[in-house]
Image (cartoon, helix red, strand yellow):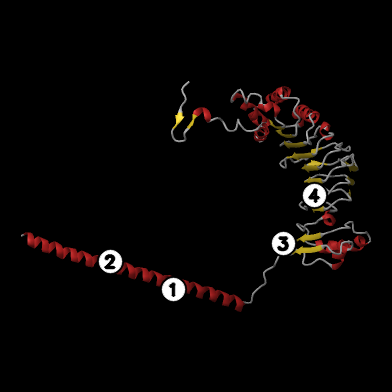
Amino acid sequence: MDVVHDDTTGINEEEKEDRISNLPDDIVHRILSFLDMKHAIQTSTLSKKWKHVWTSMSHLNLSNQTFGTFPQFSKFVRKALSRRNHHTEVSAVKLSFTGTAYNFAPVVKRIVKYAYVHNVRHVTMMWFSPGRIYHGFPECIFSSPTLKHLTLVMNERSRYPGSIPKLAWDFPALETLSLSNLRLGDYACKSVDLFSKCVNLKDLTLHQSSMSCVELINVCAPQLRNLTITDPYHFPKVFNVVAPQLKNLTASVSTRLNFHGFNFLQLSTEGLNSLEKTLSLGLDQLLREPCPFNSLKCLKIDTLKQKDCIAEVSAEVRDYFLESSSSAAFIVDIPQVPQKRSRQEAAIDTMAKKVAKLEEEKQTMVEEKITLEAKIKMQDEVIAEHKVLLEVMKLQQKKSL
């Protein structure tokens, strides 16, 4: 076969091999991990070298949104998992699906069980459901000896949060856990203790969780360092945290729904125009209890820019939080309210602006005048040159006669 040469580069076509194909397998697998598994498998048609590349991918990204019907997606999952290289561990699984629990429970169980058998360490599951019923995640999700990072998300468009098992989750290796728009407990459950077996849990995030009718929620995690609770729909009577290693606590409670007990839990002031009074009313009771923060390094209070924002934090409240942490930094971020000016000050300011504007217009006129004079001078010079040329042409005409 003739070799075609590229004169512009001096490199023949045989030397112009596919650079991606020459990359190490781990880099190729990393690139494919950003694709949906359906598209990753389609790369097997590129060449013989790519035929089996997808079978040893350690990151599985699955979504039914690229399939027309649920049976098509279920069939694809069954074939893809059966043809995958079973000697390759699964390091991460990302599963996103739209539909009801009735349709997807079997396929979710299949994927999760396969991943857990292959020592998966990261699982991200996103469930998008427009329905108006509670959806329960399969119980098989909540037990794995190797899983280190788990994220469960129920779409915020659903009127009802997804539910999860009420028994303690068996994740001895789990380090980070993020739950979004999920229901912890129900009417038949007065207390919840989900994380007692997560002995290595370090980061816990609860976003828009529903804890309705639950009187007690226990978070007992000896290694927990970061606890974030944002915008819960309901809050229990008691949220008990036993975490001796806790370093960062973030709690943001929204009051767009009027539930009892929110005032005392509120850390932002949205919708609580009398928060300072609420703190004062509960201060006597608060001071009887020891502050739970023994090694506090920084306490920051952010106030919202609203009509009745907190003007100041009382010394009693400040001393309560800092009683065991005398060296901690105390920061209060209060929005600056512009001071009202007198009529005379406003008139002076207005006059100063007018003077500045007039001076600017004057300067502009001066600059325009200079520019105009320069143009007139240039035109005069052009006219003079044309007159000289005209006289020369007349003299030449006379000589020719």
Which mark's residue is nearer the viewer, 1 or 2?
A: 2
Distance from the alpha carbon under mark 1 to that under mark 2: 26 Å
Residue pictured at 15% horizontal, 65% vertical:
391
Circle 4 is placed at which residue position? 228
Instruction: Locate residue 53 relative to residue 261 in the image: left or right.
Output: left
Q: Which of 56 and 320 is in front in this view?
A: 56
Splitting the image into 4 quarters, where does residue 25 fall? top right
Distance from the alpha carbon under mark 3 to that under mark 2: 64 Å
Circle 3 is placed at which residue position? 306
Which residue type does callout 3 highlight?
Answer: Gln
Determine contact: label 1, label 3, CB under 8 Å: no
- Label ID, residue 379: 2
SS category of the residue bearing label 3: loop
Instruction: Locate residue 344 relative to residue 133 in the image: left or right.
Output: left
Q: Residue 399, image x and y in percent?
A: 7, 62
Name the N-terminal-most of marks 4 and 1: 4
Q: Which residue lies furthest to the bottom in this view?
A: 344
Which residue type does callout 4 highlight?
Answer: Thr
Determine contact: label 4, label 3, CB under 8 Å: no
Circle 1 is placed at which residue position? 362
Name the N-terminal-most of marks 3 and 2: 3
- Label ID, residue 278: none
Q: Residue 206, image x and y in percent?
A: 80, 46
Q: Residue 132, image x and y in percent?
A: 75, 37
Instruction: Locate residue 70 relative to residue 331 in the image: left or right.
Output: left
SS category of the residue bearing label 1: helix
Task: Give the quarter of the figure containing the C terminus.
Answer: bottom left
